[in-house]
Image (cartoon, rainbow, N blue to C red):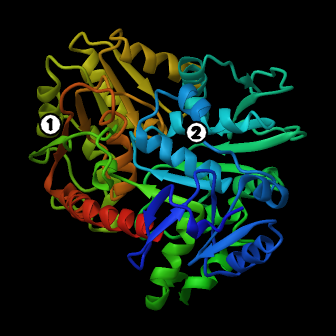
Amino acid sequence: MAPYDQLDIVTDRAESGRTRSYPPEAIRIPIAATPEGYATFIRCKKLAAYTIHGREVLTDPVSYSAVFGGALAVGESFASANAHLFPFQTDLVARALDRQRFAIFADCGLGKTPMALAWAHAVAEKGKVLVLVPLAVLNQWKREAMRFHGTTMADLRAGETWTEGIAIANYEARRDIDMTDVRGIVLDESSILKNENGETRDWLCSLSAGIPYRLAVSATPAPNDHAEYASHAVFLGYATTAKEFFARFFRKDGTNWILRGHAITPFYRNLATWSTYIYSPKALGYSDSTEMGEEPSYLYRQCAVPAEWTSKAAGQLFASVGTAEDRSAVFGTLRATPGPRSEAIMGYLEGKRGVIWCARNAEEEFFASQLRATGASVAVINGAMEIEERVELVDAYRSGHVDHIVSKARVLGFGVNLPECDHMVYSGFGFSFEETYQAIRRAHRYGRKGRLEVMFPYTDPEAPALAVLREKQARFLGDVAEMQRRFWEAA
């Protein structure tokens, strides 16, 4: 086997500016500046043939398979079976298959489900694959598998037999799963791992122990929410505990872990060996993409406080969510009280089909009643509703048989696709930007036609919460652009 640096077939640009040369079949093994990276380097010394370029070890597929168990290459057969993928999606799946245990952090609407299904079908050639998803999107995954691959996944929730291929189950209905001959596992909405002390996280880590191929897919992690990375590192087997992960790059400040200034570059270099983050494929040079061309149109409507409403805390007219004792009244009774606020919402939705996000049950019931009084058909989707009924109501809205959906962001705001929604009212906003962002992205995503319009009604008592959300929104694009740059430069 000729030295890799003497072959001039495939080239890329090294950090130093030199042009590297690789044979087309070369497998690149990243060596992070971490204890795990050193352990990987020691294993690489067992390879029959290899060369070292900076922080990468290059080897041939046969040598790699003998030491690491075999990497799945993305060739012509993969491209043919996944012609529906965009180039950036193909590249992300290829990277995930090459690394074997990987996390794809991709913004809402970039096609995490098609990417994860392509990965699962490639791994299924080596053995059984288990896909775990939130119950609300289980049937959606089954439909996508049939649509893109013409395959039926064994539904473990329904008690179907699983002897080969891909099986799907939901997090909520956990049960003993026979992992015999399982070679791969996929976690959809893998932010479920974030609670580092959670029972579900411990179960998932235990379930995946020893599985050679692991994929976690999640929407945008908050730029400063490092707990998301720690929990994923544990699930993927790149750290024993979250504390071990934090200790490498962070210092403890009370109950918080603060990233050390000198550890920023090593931190992202480590992350890039087992994960990637992508917000804008076009910013990375991809011409074909699923990202939307423009942000939604936001309408902020200031409304007067109803004359009969007073602060529940002290009977004061001038309440504010900036004061803890007033928060329940402002987020609760104020939003379910008839007056200028509700009139503005009803006026906005007149002649339109839309989705109203609420925060409390009373708010849901109030607006459902107001809408039904106009003769509109309304689907109220709450946490007490069986998942099958939720799916039926969402499908009814998407097909045009229901005029409005009234729900909470924490119930329906993650994972469900609603590109048919052109008008959205965010009545129940709070201080959580992630929850608000995710809910809006149910409709602002690939597949929609035209620009989404989102109306935020607010009164003076609610203004502080809205100001926080708008400040976070203004900061968000800059933050995620910087985070994407760090990930891709480190890779």
Circle 2: element type: helix
Q: Residue at x 22, y 56 (%)?
A: 466
Residues at badges 2 and 1 in contact (C-beta under 8 Å)? no
To which residue does mark 2 refer? 116
The numbered mark at residue 339 is: 1
Q: Residue at x 42, y 71 (%)?
A: 224
Q: Is residue 323 above or below residue 175?
A: below
As drawn, is 142 to the left or to the right of 205? left
Q: Is residue 385 visible?
A: no
Of the image marks 2 and 1, the number of the one nearer the N terminus: 2
Indicate the quadrant where residue 88 lies: top left
Indicate the quadrant where residue 361 lies: top left
In-front residue for pair 104/176 = 104
As drawn, is 448 to the left or to the right of 223? left
As drawn, is 411 to the left or to the right of 69? left
In-front residue for pair 3/124 = 3
**Quadrant the N terminus occupies:** bottom right
Q: Which class describes the residues within 10 Å of circle 1: few (<14), some (14-19), or many (20+)?
A: some
